[in-house]
Image (cartoon, coloured by chain):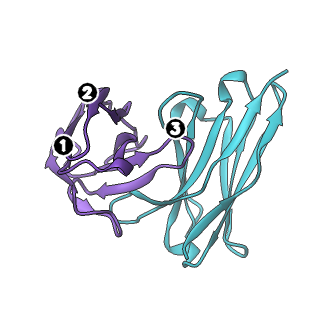
Chain colours: A purple, B cyan
């Protein structure tokens, strides 16, 4: 199975900050990397698919990059509604494993 | 709008089975797959498996092989996930999600079904 790691596991940031979350796969997954946002008690939402494609309706302050084994999710200017947990997921080979998540909270 | 509506919360005893439904609307059901993902209390997301609504092909997580069955009913645009021989560590919120055929990203999610396993 492909193992996914994320760093940091949590971070504190202020509104307006630029936030970067990294995700690493244990082997190459080319660009089969998706990012999800989950707020407490809610279902996850797709933000980015195929490493860098913005899902419909997602604000442009979210962006994704990377290929192979190393990926990043960037929020260019953190907004109050962005405080949540973020998960990466590989869809290169089954099982489609998730990273452990990065919790973004208010500084 | 495109949505997935899941069945209600369940409380089961250890050793029992549970079957969760996921009804799709406002899109062509057979053009997408359905994944099932679960989340134990306070934990991260765990991919359980995937089913093609087109031909019923399935792919299950190894750890659940033999205990899980995913099916679809194309006449009602509904997907089902049955988990047998329940244990306390199966207590979780179970989500269904539509799978995009190109990226395999999950672009539409149900609200989740809480399954509690307790004696």
| Image location of residue B83, percent across then percent down | 71, 39
**Can residue A106 be seen in this snapshot?**
yes
Q: CA distance from mark 1 to mark 3?
A: 38 Å
Q: Are marks 1 and 3 in contact (CB under 8 Å)?
A: no
* Residue B2 in the figure: left or right of residue A79: right
| Image location of residue A19, percent across then percent down | 20, 41
The quarter of the picture where residue A41 lies is top right
Residue wearing tag 2? A8
Please state which of residues A9 and A26 is positioned toward the viewer in this rendering: A9
Q: CA distance from mark 2 to mark 3?
A: 27 Å
Q: CA distance from mark 1 to mark 2?
A: 16 Å
Q: Which mark is residue B24?
A: none
| Image location of residue B75, percent across then percent down | 72, 76
Please state which of residues B51 and A88 is positioned toward the viewer in this rendering: A88
Q: Mark 2 falls on what kind of element?
A: loop
- Work out whether disc 1 and disc 2 sit on a shared chain: yes
- Work out whether disc 1 and disc 3 sit on a shared chain: no
The quarter of the picture where residue B14 lies is top right
Work out whether B31 lies above or below A8: below
**For the point 59% across and 30% down, which residue is it?**
B40
**For the point 14% across and 47% down, which residue is it?**
A66
Residue wearing tag 3? B61
Q: Which mark is residue A17?
A: 1
**Can residue A90 be seen in this snapshot?**
no
Q: Mark 1 falls on what kind of element?
A: loop
**For the point 48% across and 37% down, which residue is it?**
B45
Query: Label 2 marks which chain's residue?
Result: A
* Residue B96 in the figure: left or right of residue A59: right
Give the quadrant of the N terminus of chain B. Answer: bottom right
Please state which of residues A71 and A40 is positioned toward the viewer in this rendering: A40
Work out whether B17 lies above or below B50: above
Query: Label 1 marks which chain's residue?
Result: A
């Amino acid at each position: 199975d492909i193992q996914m790691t994320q760093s940091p596991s949590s971070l504190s940031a202020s509104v307006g900050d630029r936030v970067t979350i990294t995700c690493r796969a244990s082997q190459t997954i080319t660009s089969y990397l998706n990012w999800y946002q989950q707020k407490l008690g809610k279902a996850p939402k797709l933000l980015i698919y195929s490493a860098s494609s913005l899902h419909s309706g997602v604000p442009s302050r979210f962006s994704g990059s990377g290929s192979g084994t190393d990926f990043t999710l960037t929020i260019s200017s953190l907004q109050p509604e962005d405080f949540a947990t973020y998960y990466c997921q590989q869809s290169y080979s089954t099982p489609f494993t998730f990273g452990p998540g990065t919790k973004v909270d208010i500084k | 709008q495109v949505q997935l509506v899941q069945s209600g919360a369940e409380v089961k005893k250890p050793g029992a089975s549970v079957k969760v439904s996921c009804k799709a609307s406002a899109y062509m059901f057979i053009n997408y797959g359905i994944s099932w993902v679960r989340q134990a209390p306070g934990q991260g997301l765990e991919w359980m498996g995937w089913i093609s609504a087109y031909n019923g092909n399935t792919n299950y997580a190894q750890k659940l092989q033999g205990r899980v069955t995913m099916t679809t009913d194309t006449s009602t645009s509904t997907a089902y996930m049955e988990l047998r021989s329940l244990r306390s560590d199966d207590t979780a919120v179970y989500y269904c999600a539509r799978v995009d055929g190109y990226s395999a990203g999950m672009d539409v999610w149900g609200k989740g079904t809480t399954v509690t396993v307790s004696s």
